[in-house]
Image (cartoon, rainbow, N blue to C red):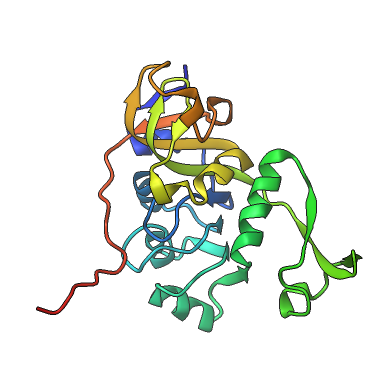
Amino acid sequence: MKPLFQSAEEVINGLEDGAVILAGGFGLCGIPEHVIQAIADKNLKNLTIVSNNCGVDDWGLGLLLEKKQIDKIYASYVGENKEFERQVINGELEVELVPQGTLAEKLRAGGAGIPAFYTPAGVGTKIAEGKEVREFHGRPYLLEEAITGDVSIVRAHTGDTFGNLVYRKTAQNFNPMIAAAGRLTIAEVEHLVEPGTIDPHHIHTPGIYVDRMLQAEQENRIERRTVKEG
C-alpha cells in the first residue's frame, strides 16, 4: 500500500528550497494542479523546474512564476505565459530550451538509468554548443544527458492503492516518463480504486515508481478557449 495523504500540503512535506522538480502534463492538460498550488502556498524558493512548459499566467506552474519561486526551467515550449516572457527578458529567470522529443527522451532515459544518448535533433544549432557530436552511419548525432530530479509530481486519472497509475488521453504525454525519473514521486489521482480493479495491460506507471499519493478532483481549466462566431 502506498501512503495516501489527506491534503496537498501534507503530501509535499519535506520538499525544500532549491529542489529540482519534474512536473508532468502539457500546458494545463494532466498537470498535478493541487500539488503545484501547495508548492506555491509553501513559498519554496530557488526551484529548478523540468516541464514541457510553464503553464499560464494564473494557473499551473505559472503560479510559481508569479511568486518568483523558480530560478531555472528546462522546457520545450514557453509561448503561453507573459510573466515567463517578462522574467526572461529582465534576466530574472534562466531558461534552457530543449527540443520536445529530446526532453521526453532525457526524462525517459533518466528513469531507465541511462546516463546519456545520441540524437540528431539540434545538430548544427545553438543547442549543440559545447556538446559532443558523433557520426553514425554517415549522419551526425548530438550527445544529450539524461534528466533526473529530486521529486516528480504527476497527475493520473485513475490509480490503485498500490500506486499503479492510468493517465487519461493526452495526459499520457510527459507523465509516464516523469513518474520514473524522480527520486521521490508524488501522484495526484482523481479516482482511487482497490488493487486488481485496473487491468494490468492498461497500467501506464507501475506502482514501483510511486512513493506518495493524493486523491483530488481536477478543475480541468481550458488553456485557450476558442469559440465559433455565431
In this picture, residue 82 sits left or right of residue 113 = left
Looking at the picture, does residue 153 appear above or below residue 76?
Answer: above
Whole-percent x, y for residue 60 in the image = 37, 57
Whole-percent x, y for residue 225 in the image = 24, 69
Whole-percent x, y for residue 167 in the image = 42, 40
Rendered residue at 53%/34% (across/down)? 205
Looking at the picture, does residue 29 appear above or below residue 188?
Answer: below
- Is 203 or 162 nearer to us in this picture? 203
Number of numbered discs visible in the structure rendering: 0
In this picture, residue 194 sits left or right of residue 22 = left
Residue 22 visible at all: yes
Rendered residue at 42%/48% (across/down)? 171
Q: Which quadrant of the rendered structure holds the C terminus? A: bottom left
Q: Residue furthest front?
A: 137
Residue 182 visible at all: no
- Is 20 or 120 nearer to us in this picture? 120
Looking at the picture, does residue 161 appear above or below residue 61?
Answer: above
Q: Residue furthest bottom?
A: 89
In this picture, residue 9 sits left or right of residue 12 = left
Whole-percent x, y for residue 198 in the image = 41, 23
In this picture, residue 218 sits left or right of residue 153 = left
Q: Residue furthest left?
A: 230
Image-quadrant location for residue 7: top left
Rendered residue at 53%/30% (across/down)? 210
